[in-house]
Amino acid sequence: MKTTINKRRWTWQREVLLRLLREARGHLDADELYRKAREICPRIGLSTVYRNLRLFRDLGLIKELQLGEGHSHYEFVREGEHQHFLCRRCGRVIEFSSLSLKGLREELELEHGVRVEVMELRLEGLCRDCLKERGDDARQGSSGKDR
Amino acid sequence: MKTTINKRRWTWQREVLLRLLREARGHLDADELYRKAREICPRIGLSTVYRNLRLFRDLGLIKELQLGEGHSHYEFVREGEHQHFLCRRCGRVIEFSSLSLKGLREELELEHGVRVEVMELRLEGLCRDCLKERGDDARQGSSGKDR
DNA sequence: ATGTTTGCAAAGCTTTTGCACCGAT
DNA sequence: ATCGGTGCAAAAGCTTTGCAAACAT
């Protein structure tokens, strides 16, 4: 099924990286993964992390997310597909899944004749807590967190 | 309404950049915008482009897109909100809008108590033409365009 | 034995920042 | 005359690449 799984060696660096990704409760960025991996094999290189993140992504084992911090985050792909909501104020990421999204996919495939393989919904706004905390003076403008 | 619009000077660099963004048929990246801008004012600096892209984004005049090329694309915000489908094979970007998405927004706000301010749906897959061209041997794997 | 994968260091890219000068108000 | 904006160059991230050594097969 996978076109390029042949001639691939299963090193224990890959073992470690994939395990860390699988065991992470949410998503990791390359550097977080690198630091975690170094606790297990201190001599691992950052390039190995990046090379394997790319490999895992191409194999469909992980998903690459743009959470708007200027670098990628990665997440192990599990059965239940879910999406991400990023709070602009506190930076919290809320994961959620939606049924409407599945319908949307079919709608698109029918209407535009395409095949959808990756579907990522990126949402930004204010989470429940920040909404409450801000109260009625809630304005967005450019005054929020700097980024 | 906008919190930081005061003390803001309207330079003709901003005039040019915003006009180019408005007149672009689709989305531009920083470098494309920079090159276009230099045709008009050759002494403009790349940092001016970036600074103003950020400004325009914070003002809500443009939207920043992650199309998965390792850098951002920017798009003038018009009334009809639309989303992007990226073909993995030919790199074409198809814009579409969907009604289901509006419903999804309300669903989320009710269900999770958040306020959604930005909503970006990133889709990848195969476009109609590439589907046809590939025919039945269509397999994804990691053999596609290199990136 | 073979050829893929690794670690290291260096390079590559996109984006940001410091600073003196410029220019809009 | 202010003081925000610009251009330049340099820096800062994140990510990729070249290469010789290491290792899985």
Image (spheres, coloured by chain):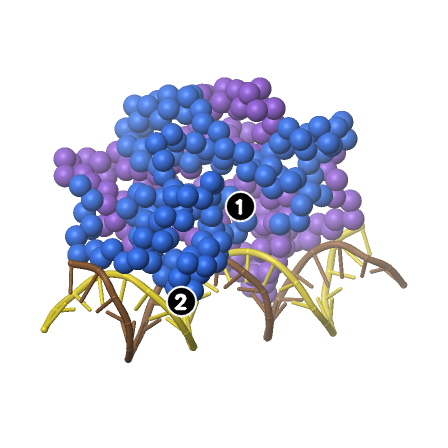
Chain colours: A blue, B purple, C yellow, D brown
The chain ID associated with circle 1 is A
Q: In whole angstroms, how far apart are the C-alphas of marks 2 and 1?
A: 30 Å
The chain ID associated with circle 2 is A
In percent of width and height, residue B118 lies at 56, 34
Which residue corresponds to mark 2?
A43
Tell me the crowding category of disc 1: few under 14, some 14 to 19, or many 20 or more residues within 10 angstroms, Cα based. some
Residue at left offset 47%, top offset 48%: A28
- One can see residue A34 in this view: no
Residue at left offset 65%, top offset 53%: B12
Q: Earlier in the sequence, mark 2 or mark 1?
A: 2
Tell me the crowding category of disc 2: few under 14, some 14 to 19, or many 20 or more residues within 10 angstroms, Cα based. few
Describe the element under mark 1 as helix, strand or loop.
loop
In percent of width and height, residue A47 lies at 39, 63
Q: In screen coordinates, is B58 left or right of B111?
A: right
Q: Are marks 2 and 1 on the same chain?
A: yes
In percent of width and height, residue A103 lies at 37, 21
Residue A68's disc number: 1
Residue situated in front as seen by the camera: B102 or A24: A24
Describe the element under mark 2 as helix, strand or loop.
loop
Residue at left offset 45%, top offset 59%: A39
Residue situated in front as seen by the camera: C4 or B80: C4
Tell me the kind of residue under disc 2: Arg
In percent of width and height, residue A140 lies at 68, 36
Tell me the kind of residue under disc 1: Gly
Residue at left offset 49%, top offset 54%: A32
- One can see residue A98 in this view: yes
